[in-house]
Image (spheres, rainbow, N blue to C red):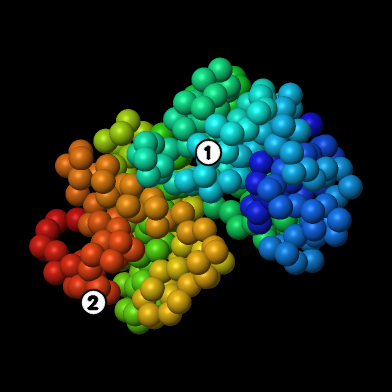
Amino acid sequence: MIGVAGAGAFGTALAVALARDGRAVRLWGRDVAGLAAGRESARLPGVRLPENVTVTAEIADLGGLEAVLLAVPMQALGGVLREAAFDAGALVACCKGVDLTALTGPAAVMAAARPKARVALLTGPSFAADIAKGLPTALTLACADDAAGERLQHLLSTPVLRLYRTTDVTGAELGGALKNVVAVAAGVVIGVGLGDSARAALMTRGYAEMVRLALALGARAETLAGLSGLGDLVLTCGSEQSRNFRFGLALGRGEAFDAGVTVEGVATARAVARLAAERGIDMPVTAMVAALVEGRIDLSSAIQSLLTRPLKAE
């Protein structure tokens, strides 16, 4: 049996996709009485849970399973693991971000909380609604232990949910985390009316930042050019299904945004701006987003800061 911790849209979608392929799945969430009774999530209208998905509010029920997918927000990951009384064969993080306190990705957070566990990361271009509907999706499974990664790859792949593995955990983590920051910036660009050409330029320069930081932290450039980097960047910066893009869009238009919606790029921008400053790495897009969300600059100043950067070779 496979466990999924987190009954939000993405966790529920993964549970549905795996169960449709015949696996028994145990789905945990804090407030799941309605989901257990009605077998349908308000966040995925029209998608019913297959009968082989068991819904539970007791996180201890995830103990002893072959693998548990951790589909909880990045900033909540450490807390969930510290309070959770369960052990599993493998822990697979499905969140994308950098922890504000530790300034690390999910793999280090999992390893600190569960030193003996095999840890892996599931990331890449995907929307929960597409996965839940059974639409073809390709993701990256990152695991430092390639043999363990191969076992997880076969355990978690389905005919329409295809996983490609890598041992470059750092690259996969940073690709997934940093593309959210660039997506917020892309949303701002469209929100203020700068147009699609400006968005393309922003994405390109944002991608250069992603690679710059990733290489400095020991990642491989080809990982950033794959599903977990460039692939996810293209998806997230180009669709209003992306929470990060929608948040930036609202910011650019001066509109309110639902405070109950997790926007991973906000905390990640703040964490990465600190990390980049400590290491002396130039990341102007990230710095602009961090300053915006922290209220240190206004929108016009943020845009001007990017448009007035010195001319140089690409």
Q: Report the residue that reaches farthest toward the right.
A: 51
Q: Quadrant of the rendered structure where residue 313 is?
A: bottom left
The C terminus, quarter of image: bottom left
Where residue 283 sits in the image (x, y, percent)? 24, 52
* Residue at position x 68%, y 48% in the image: 30
Where residue 104 sits in the image (x, y, percent)? 38, 36
The N terminus, quarter of image: top right
Residue tagged 2: 300
Tell me the SS state at disc 2.
helix
Nearest the eye: 69 or 129: 69
Q: CA distance from mark 1 to mark 2?
A: 37 Å
* Residue at position x 54%, y 24% in the image: 114
Residue 196 visible to the viewer? no
Residue 212 left/right relative to 6: left
Residue 69 visible to the viewer? yes
Q: Quadrant of the rendered structure where residue 260 is?
A: bottom right
Residue tagged 1: 79
Residue 275 left/right relative to 147: left
Nearest the eye: 211 or 108: 108
- Amino acid type at circle 2 is Ser
- Amino acid type at circle 1 is Gly
Where residue 134 sits in the image (x, y, percent)? 74, 55
Tell me the SS state at disc 1.
helix
Vertical relation: 232 (above or below) 63: below
